[in-house]
Every structure is written in structure tokens, then in C-alpha cells.
Image (cartoon, coloured by chain):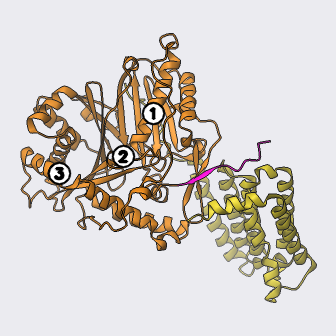
Chain colours: A yellow, B orange
């Protein structure tokens, strides 16, 4: 006999598929209840945003090979979007852009700096995520310059923390940054 | 903590660039080499053997990473994983379940399998690596019999250069046919299953028959294959387009190269069944011999190879970001593949050193079918047997059955083994 009799067809994780369908149904039901009961308050959208956030986090966490810097970057993006959605649903007073997102950026940059310090020998694995985070961290600065949000100390701190993070990384790991950029951008 | 070393990396060769961009669960670009031993496999010994072989073929210790414009290989220091066979052959290799390696070693009963992502290497190089693995396995499993050295522990003379770039001709004109091919019709097997049917022929009888017809084994089997397709799929479905058979060619026979990366090209036979009146085996064989003569020349092969290299080196193609390349190529690939009816790859004789042959029953070679090329064929020869393999996602065995009958009619002893997905044919004889 050359082949096993019973072959595992790997039909994909059924549980994940069922839970995805349940989530989709739940979202529709919540939206309908929201429309029928309190149409002036968009709490239905909020719950959908939370469900999407949970799913992105869970599905990404299931990918075994992603390193910690990738998870941090993903959280920065998804939590920021979640805050934006909540802010929007509650009347868009811009607290997400002026307070919440700067706090997220400060926290993420601090974690990345600590990560660079304690495992700088493996820094090459974090380079790309680190650089993307630094670029994203410039968002409050752009929004202030464009007069879209008020100039606040928190936003300025967020930008400065990311600048410090960048200088620190270049000083400590410039060779790694150069090597990683060369391979990532080869033509 | 690990040492502060920046992992080494290398570019994908010109041919390999297309594989990861187009690959997925439905189109795996994976091929399999198996060795059927005479005794049950000892997993621990096999794991040791794989490690030993990897130490000699260090360039296969890589993982695939995404760049901004292309994929690239990066050194992989993880331990190689190995498991008992439990999936269909040539399935997509999920890097997350395989410690990021681009090849996967499995075993079942008396059989060792190695599934290889084509981006890593071609069949010829993979076979050298696999043979090293089998040699090591036999030596480790039979230490007493192999106290003396039976083979020279030579360091393999290889590199990972892109031999396409080293040998292509900038000025060669394109020889691609503009006519689409006949696509095999029929229902597909559900749930992503792949059927593997091995038709095992006696080599001496086959050689004798080929001598009678004054043709090579590949030409003879190609003619039988075309006839089987013609009678069992083309005629019943009133086919109009030509039956096109893609035959991969090992470029190392034409150009000097020690590369471990891909270095193959292909020729495509174009059988216009009605226009050329190809309705008997003799006529089909004459056509195949003539078309081989016309297409299997250094000049023609250089044209095909150069055409592909020029696409990969085109500055406009180069600057497209990888995520866009993936979208474009995946959308276009189903259309591109419609220029081939079937692929038949014959890797020829697998030579093993005398004493080691006693432990091996046979070798198998399989290629992954895809949604357009629903059947792929491959062959390899060991000792006095040639194993012709059909890997298919079609839910019938008419072509395979007709192929078997035609060989049998020519008085060549033949027997069948299969993975049981389509069991009808395997019960015959």
C-alpha cells in the first residue's frame, strides 16, 4: 500500500467559519434593533466595530509566525480605528484624534523602544514594523499642521516620543536597518 | 539570546519569481518525489537523515519572505519538521505548519515523501537532494552494512546563481504560440482532493517497443497520452482547439550550470487533431517525433527561456509593488494557463549506487494539478521499472484507463497503484 487509507482533507477550521457566520448574523440583528429602538444613537455601529476589532486580533493571533513588533503595529492601527469609530458614533468630538490615538502612539513607541533595548540583537526582525510605526506616529503632527485638530501637549509628546524612538533605533541598529531595507526593497 | 548575525538572504531566480506570486491553496506549484523502500520507515532515523542531507545542501535551509517588489529567500535556522503522511500529495505547503521550510518531508509505511515548493528548486535539483536524504537514511538505518564507505562524501559543487540571467539572449525573439489549448472537460473531485494513479511499466519491454518505433521513451509516452486524451475527452466533448502538451526541459543539458535554483524551460507540442488528421497512434507518434525535432533545439529553447527572462527583467514589471503584482498575476494566471492542455514531465532514470539499490523498491514523481490543467503527468525510472503518474482533480479515470489499455495492447507489462481517491481504475487487473 502506497498511501494511507484515510486522508485528512483539512477542510479548514469549521469552528472559525461557524463563529464568523454567528458574528455576521449578530451584527445584522444588532443593527436592526438599533434602527428600530434608538435610531438617533448609533450604538449598533459601535458593537460591529468591536466585533471586527476582536476578529482581526484573534485571526492575526492565530498566525503563529508573526513577531511581537507586528502585533504591536496591528494593535496600534486597529485600536486607533476602533477609537475613531466610537468617537464617530458618539458625535465625533475628536477626542479619539486628540487624546486616545496619541496615547496609543506613545504607548506603542515606548514598548518598541523597550523591545529594541532588550532584544536589539534580534532587531532586524522588527525594523520594518518599527519604521511603519514611526511613520504612523507622525499622524497627529499632520493633523495639527492641517488645523484639523487642536494643538495639544499630548499630540506633541506622541510625535516626540516617536522621533526619540527613531533616533534611538538608528543609533543602536543602523546596520540592521540598512540591511533590512536593502532586502525589502530589492528590485 | 541569539548571536547578533544578520540572516543571509538571496533573490529568487527568474523562474521562481512567478511561483509565490501566483501560488495558493488551489494552485500549489508543489511537486513530490517519493522513495518506496523495502522495509518500514523509522521516523527518528529519517529525521536524522533529513538533517544530514540539509547540512550538505545548506541552501535549502531557507524561508520565503515578502519584500516591497519581490519575494526573497532568507536563511532559516528552525529545526526541520517531519510527520506521517495524512494529506493528499502535492498540496500547498503552509509555511506556518512547516517551520517555514519550502519543502516538506512525510512518511507512510515504507515510503518517504518530499513535497517541494517549485520556487525553491526544480525537479532535477530536488532529486539530488532527495537522493542524498535516501542515502543517509539507508546508511543510518543499516549501520552494520555500511561501516565501509560506499560513496564518496564529496562536497557538492553547486551555487545558487540565477542561471537564467547568466544564459539568456537579450535579442532572442518570442516563439510563444498565440492559440489557446483544448482544456480537459469534466467534473472535479470535491473537497480539494487529488487523485494519484501510478502506472508502472516494465522498462525493457518499453525500450524494445520504442526501438521498434524509432523514438524516445518520452516521445512514445507523449503519443500514448495524446491518443488517450483524444479518444476519451477530446472526441466526446467535440474539441476544436489543439491538444497542447507542455514538456519541461532540464536546461543543464544545454547550458553549463551548477545552480541549485530552478534552471528549466519547456517545449509545447501543439497537436491540431483535425487539421493534421491525427486519428491513429502511428500518425500521432509521427507528429510527436516531428514536433520534438522542431522544438527541442537549443535555439528554440533559448527563445522560450529568454522570453520569460525578459518579462521578469522588464523595468515596468519590476517597479510594480508586490501586492499589486499578486492581484494582477492571480487574475491573469487562469487565462495564461489556458495555453496548455496537459504537462508531462519525465525526469528520467534515477541512478543510485549499487549496494543502496537493494533497499529501494521504487521511486515516484508527482506534480500538482490545478483548476485549468486538471491532469498532470510525470514519469521516472528506477531499475527495470518506469512509473508514469497521473495526478488529477478530474472526477473520472477515462484517460488513465485508456492510457493503461493502450500500453497493455502494445504488450508492455503494466500494473497500477493509486491513492484510492478514484478507485475504479485501481481495481482493474
Q: Identify the subunit bearing mark 2.
A: B
- Please report the bounds of the magenta region as a residue range: B1-11
* Residue A19 at x, y percent in the picture: 62, 54
Query: In front: B271, or B240?
Result: B271
Which of marks 1 and 2 precedes in the sequence?
Answer: 1
Q: Is residue A77 above or below residue B392?
A: below
* Residue A41 at x, y percent in the picture: 75, 78
Residue topped by disc 3: B293
Marks 2 and 1: CB-CB under 8 Å? no
Q: Which residue is rendered at x = 8% and y = 53% of the image? A: B278
Residue topped by disc 1: B130
Nearer to us: label 3 or label 2: 2
Q: Is residue B2 magenta?
A: yes
Residue topped by disc 2: B252
Q: Identify the subunit bearing mark 3.
A: B
Distance in Å between CA atoms under marks 1 and 3? 32 Å
Query: On the picture, is B133 further left or further right than B4?
Result: left
Q: Dot 3, crowdedness within 10 Å: few (<14), some or many (≥20)?
A: few
Marks 1 and 3: CB-CB under 8 Å? no
Q: Residue furthest right?
A: A153
Nearer to us: label 1 or label 3: 3
Rendered-image quadrant of the N terminus of chain A: top left
SS category of the residue bearing label 1: helix
Q: Is residue B68 magenta?
A: no
Which of marks 2 and 3 precedes in the sequence?
Answer: 2
The dominant secondary structure in magenta is loop
Q: Residue furthest top?
A: B144
SS category of the residue bearing label 3: helix
Distance in Å between CA atoms under marks 3 and 2? 19 Å
Amino acid at each position: 500500500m502506497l498511501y494511507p487509507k484515510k486522508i485528512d482533507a483539512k477542510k479548514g477550521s469549521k469552528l472559525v467559519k461557524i463563529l464568523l457566520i454567528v458574528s455576521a448574523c449578530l451584527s445584522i440583528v444588532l443593527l436592526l434593533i438599533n434602527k428600530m429602538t434608538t435610531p438617533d444613537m448609533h450604538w449598533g455601529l459601535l458593537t460591529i466595530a468591536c466585533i471586527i476589532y476582536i476578529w482581526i486580533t484573534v485571526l492575526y493571533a492565530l498566525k503563529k509566525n508573526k513577531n511581537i513588533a507586528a502585533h504591536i503595529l496591528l494593535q496600534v492601527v486597529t485600536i486607533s480605528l476602533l477609537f475613531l469609530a466610537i468617537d464617530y458614533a458618539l458625535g465625533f468630538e475628536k477626542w479619539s484624534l486628540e487624546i486616545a490615538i496619541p496615547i496609543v502612539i506613545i504607548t506603542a513607541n515606548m514598548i518598541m523602544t523597550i523591545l529594541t533595548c532588550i532584544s536589539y540583537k534580534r532587531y532586524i526582525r522588527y525594523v520594518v514594523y518599527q519604521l511603519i510605526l514611526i511613520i504612523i506616529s507622525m499622524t497627529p503632527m499632520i493633523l495639527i499642521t492641517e488645523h484639523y485638530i487642536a494643538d495639544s501637549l499630548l499630540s506633541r509628546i506622541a510625535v516626540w516620543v516617536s522621533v526619540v524612538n527613531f533616533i534611538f533605533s538608528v543609533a543602536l541598529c543602523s546596520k540592521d536597518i540598512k540591511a533590512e531595507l536593502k532586502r525589502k526593497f530589492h528590485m | 539570546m541569539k548571536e547578533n548575525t544578520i540572516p543571509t538572504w538571496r533573490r529568487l531566480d527568474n523562474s521562481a519569481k512567478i511561483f509565490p506570486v501566483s501560488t495558493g491553496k488551489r494552485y500549489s506549484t508543489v511537486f513530490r518525489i517519493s522513495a518506496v523502500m523495502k522495509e518500514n520507515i523509522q521516523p527518528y532515523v529519517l529525521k536524522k537523515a533529513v538533517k544530514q542531507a540539509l547540512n550538505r545542501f545548506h541552501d535549502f535551509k531557507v524561508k520565503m519572505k515578502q519584500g516591497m517588489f519581490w519575494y526573497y529567500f532568507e536563511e532559516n535556522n528552525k529545526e526541520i519538521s517531519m510527520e506521517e503522511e495524512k494529506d493528499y500529495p502535492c498540496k500547498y505547503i503552509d509555511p506556518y505548519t512547516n517551520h517555514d521550510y519550502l519543502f516538506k518531508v512525510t512518511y507512510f509505511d515504507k515510503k518517504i515523501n518530499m513535497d517541494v515548493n517549485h520556487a525553491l528548486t526544480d525537479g532535477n535539483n530536488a532529486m539530488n537532494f532527495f537522493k542524498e536524504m535516501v542515502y543517509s537514511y539507508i546508511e543510518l538505518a543499516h549501520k552494520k552494512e555500511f561501516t565501509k564507505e560506499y560513496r564518496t562524501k564529496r562536497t557538492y559543487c553547486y551555487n545558487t546563481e540565477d542561471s537564467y540571467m547568466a544564459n539568456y539572449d537579450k535579442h532572442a525573439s518570442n516563439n510563444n504560440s498565440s492559440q489557446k489549448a483544448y482544456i480537459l472537460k469534466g467534473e472535479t473531485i470535491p473537497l480539494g482532493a487529488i487523485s494519484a494513479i501510478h502506472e508502472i511499466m516494465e522498462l525493457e519491454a518499453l525500450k524494445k517497443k520504442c526501438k521498434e518505433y524509432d523514438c524516445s521513451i518520452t516521445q512514445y509516452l507523449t503519443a500514448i497520452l495524446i491518443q488517450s486524451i483524444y479518444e476519451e475527452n477530446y472526441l466526446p466533448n467535440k474539441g476544436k482547439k489543439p491538444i497542447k502538451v507542455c514538456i519541461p526541459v532540464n536546461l543543464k543539458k544545454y547550458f553549463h550550470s551548477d545552480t541549485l535554483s530552478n534552471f528549466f524551460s519547456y517545449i509545447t507540442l501543439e497537436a491540431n487533431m483535425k487539421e493534421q488528421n491525427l486519428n491513429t497512434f502511428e500518425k500521432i507518434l509521427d507528429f510527436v517525433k516531428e514536433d520534438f525535432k522542431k522544438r527541442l533545439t537549443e535555439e528554440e529553447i533559448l527563445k522560450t527561456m529568454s522570453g520569460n527572462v525578459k518579462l521578469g527583467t522588464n523595468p515596468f514589471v519590476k517597479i510594480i509593488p508586490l501586492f499589486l503584482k499578486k492581484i494582477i498575476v492571480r487574475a491573469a494566471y487562469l487565462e495564461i494557463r489556458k495555453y496548455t492542455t496537459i504537462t508531462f514531465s519525465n525526469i528520467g532514470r534515477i541512478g543510485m549506487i549499487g549496494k543502496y539499490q537493494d533497499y529501494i523498491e521504487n521511486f515516484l514523481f508527482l506534480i500538482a494539478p490545478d483548476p485549468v490543467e486538471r491532469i498532470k503527468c510525470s514519469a521516472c525510472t528506477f531499475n527495470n521499472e518506469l512509473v508514469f503518474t497521473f495526478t488529477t482533480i478530474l472526477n473520472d479515470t477515462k484517460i488513465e484507463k485508456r492510457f493503461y489499455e493502450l500500453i497493455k495492447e502494445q504488450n508492455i507489462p503494466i500494473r497500477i497503484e493509486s491513492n484510492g481517491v478514484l478507485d475504479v481504475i485501481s481495481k482493474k487487473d
